[in-house]
Amino acid sequence: MSSNLSLLQPPARSDNLIDVGILAPPFARTATFGAAPAAPSPSLDLESEIIKLKRQRNAVILAHYYQESDIQDLADFVGDSLELSRRAAATEADIIVFAGVHFMAETAKILNPGKQVLLPDLDAGCSLADGCPADQFAKFLERYPGHTVISYINCSAAVKAMSDLICTSSNAARLVAQIPADQPIVFAPDRNLGRYVMKQTGRDMVLWPGTCIVHEQFSVKKIVQLRERHPNARLIAHPECEEPVLRMADFIGSTTALLKHVENSSEKEFIIATEPGILHAMQRVAPGKLLIPAPPDGNCACNECPHMRKNTLEKLYLCLRDRTPEITLDAEIARRALRPIERMLAMS
């Protein structure tokens, strides 16, 4: 424990800030492209071709639980951000295809600088990452010298490079609890996860005011109405949800924790307040249980992540066929971003 904590005595904040001149614009996606891809033949069996290309290229497909079910079924590993980070760090494949969003592919590249990392759709971003531009975050941190900076993994490589420790929703509370009690903390970019961690640990933290566009959409009124129709259903929620939803929840946990809870609980009905892509994995491990996605506020599919849904089987095939778009990172940003990720993996 002490060896891990010794890593977290923060340097002077100026030492951890990076030259904003080398940062990409706040909403830029960093990658390299070839020519515009030729569309596959409509008669092509995409699943078979993806499997064949994966074998030919010695590639591994990592998919997040929020991907569409067809992609999850083809992936070598499906998981949450923490598990996929571990898989990326351990893989012996030559090519990593990340069926997720941009910050996840960046993390895989940081952990594997010598490997080719592909993202099926470069526009698969993240509202949390995009809502915490590195240049603005650098200015924010100047107001809090001497603070340990803990950043949720849902942030850009440049923000990771300004952080002392990275966390996921699976391990955030455990990691914060390991920071000395007299050490002030900045937590970014998700304020809802930060508030939840503060309640779990009793620690006060300075929070960056970011939110997830999916988890802030759930309607308390509609959840109450659902519970009236399904009085035996248990409400389970991701800690990125807004506080009124979390106060109603019977269980709060990370994506993986929610999955395990549904699998192991003796209850038979669940209202699930997170991105509904997880229902595919839940149905696999708990086929006899009733799984009800929590409704968003308004008549929309706002509980589905628009960024995660940008990846399709066709785009997965094309990126394997053409080996593009490829994630590339500034070497200095990648070097600095690696340290807090390695600390997370060591302390988890």
Image (cartoon, grey):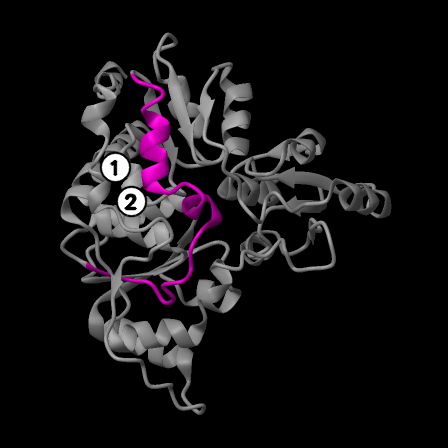
Residue 154 location, x and y as percent? 41, 43
Residue type marked 1? Ala
Was residue 289 drawn as part of the magenta stretch in this picture? no
Residue 198 to residue 115: above or below:
above
**Type of amino acid at the residue the image marks with label 2:** Ala
186 or 311: nearer the viewer: 186
The x and y percentages for residue 82 are: 38, 41
Quarter of the figure that contains the N terminus: top left
Q: Pointers 2 and 1 in contact (CB under 8 A)?
A: yes
Q: x and y percent of residue 166 in the render?
A: 33, 33
**Mark 2, residues whose alpha carbon is within 10 Å: few (<14), some, or many (≥20)?**
many
Q: Which residue is drawn at 22% across and 28% down?
A: 16
Task: Give residue 161's mark.
Answer: 1
Mark 1 surroundings within 10 Å by alpha-carbon count, few (fewer than 14), some (14 through 19), many (20 or more): many
Residue range of the region highlighted in magenta in the rendering? 116-145
Say what secondary structure mark 2 lies in.
helix
Q: Is residue 247 left or right of residue 227?
A: left
Quarter in which the C terminus is drawn: top left
Above or below, 107 against 241 in this view is below
Q: Is residue 139 magenta?
A: yes
Disc 2 target residue: 157
Nearer to me, 313 or 77: 313
